[in-house]
Amino acid sequence: MIKQLKKKGLDAPLVPFLYILGGILAFAYGIAFHKYYDGYMWTILYGVLMILAGAIFINTSIRGKHKIWNSLLSKMTIDPNSKVLDLGTGHGMVLLMFAKLLSGNGHATGIDLWRNSDQSDNSLQNTQNIIKQQHLSHIADVKTANMISLPFADKKYDYVVSSLAFHNIKPASARVHALEEAVRVLTDNGSLIIVDTGHHKKEYTDALSSLGLEVIEAKTYGVSGWWTGPWMPTYSIIAKRDHS
């Protein structure tokens, strides 16, 4: 099971396993030593909640984020000739979702720094292999690049998208710089779509407005976007250049 989760690209893989392990230990302690202290039920409850939080995290990582992106794309009409840039592409989930909507005249590029702490089995070679397996090498490619210094020309991409990557950039000033780079490579009629977590939604919307973009939608999701619980939700932001 662990091997399958890693292959699917589990986000921050250490986090859910620590939650589940901690929960199992607390549950087992409460059961084993219930005769020796009055608060054992609280220990057992804590263990159950920790296990549940880890399971919710895994569900969001493997299923929930895919559901969120499906809902976003279902409301959009993507020009098959579009040029798409996926920031922090990881295993290429969003990259491939866009690539499947493009024609031979369109193209989707994904970039990443390929850190396994961000996503399991995260490597350039692995994602290239996934693209080949999907028979999309003629439409999609991946590169090693940093979101705060994009190696692309101004106004090159019709869609700049990012899934659960911006919150990994620290500090806040660096995240703002990454947003500036995303806006720089966006065409005049382009759309920026960010799905993220980490309580930075207002930070992003304020920065994008100051950069001349109109925020079309800013939405927070329910249980399918929870990272352990409602205190750490997933949200999406859709912004376009403001021509008013």
Image: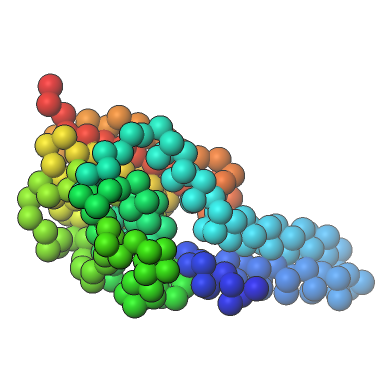
- In the displayed structure image, the side of residue 134 where residue 171 appears, left or right: left
Q: Nearer the viewer, residue 223 or 102?
A: 102
Using the rendered view, name the quadrant where residue 215 is placed. top left
Q: Is residue 96 above or below residue 21?
A: above
Give the residue displayed 43% in from the left and 36% down from the top.
Answer: 74
159 left or right of 162 in image: left
Structure colour scheme? rainbow
The answer to whether residue 23 of the structure is visible from this angle is: yes
Q: Position of residue 99 (x, y in %)?
A: 33, 53
- Counting from the top left corner in percent of width and height, residue 182 is at 19, 50
Which residue is located at x 18 percent, y 60 percent?
A: 148
Side (left or right) of 227 relative to 20: left
Query: Visible in this render: residue 183?
Result: no
Q: Position of residue 218 (x, y in %)?
A: 37, 34
Q: From this viewpoint, which residue is outermost toward the top?
A: 244
**Number of numbered tags placed on the structure image:** 0
Question: What percent of the width, then of the height, locates residue 94?
Answer: 38, 54
Tell which of 85 and 175 is nearer to you. 85
Q: Quadrant of the C terminus?
A: top left
Which residue is rendered at x = 50% and y = 40% of the image?
221
Quadrant in which residue 222 is drawn: top right
Q: Residue at x 23, y 69 (%)?
A: 143
Residue at the left extreme?
A: 154
User: Which quarter shows the N terminus?
Assistant: bottom right
- 158 shown above or below 144: above
Q: Is residue 230 above or below residue 76?
A: below
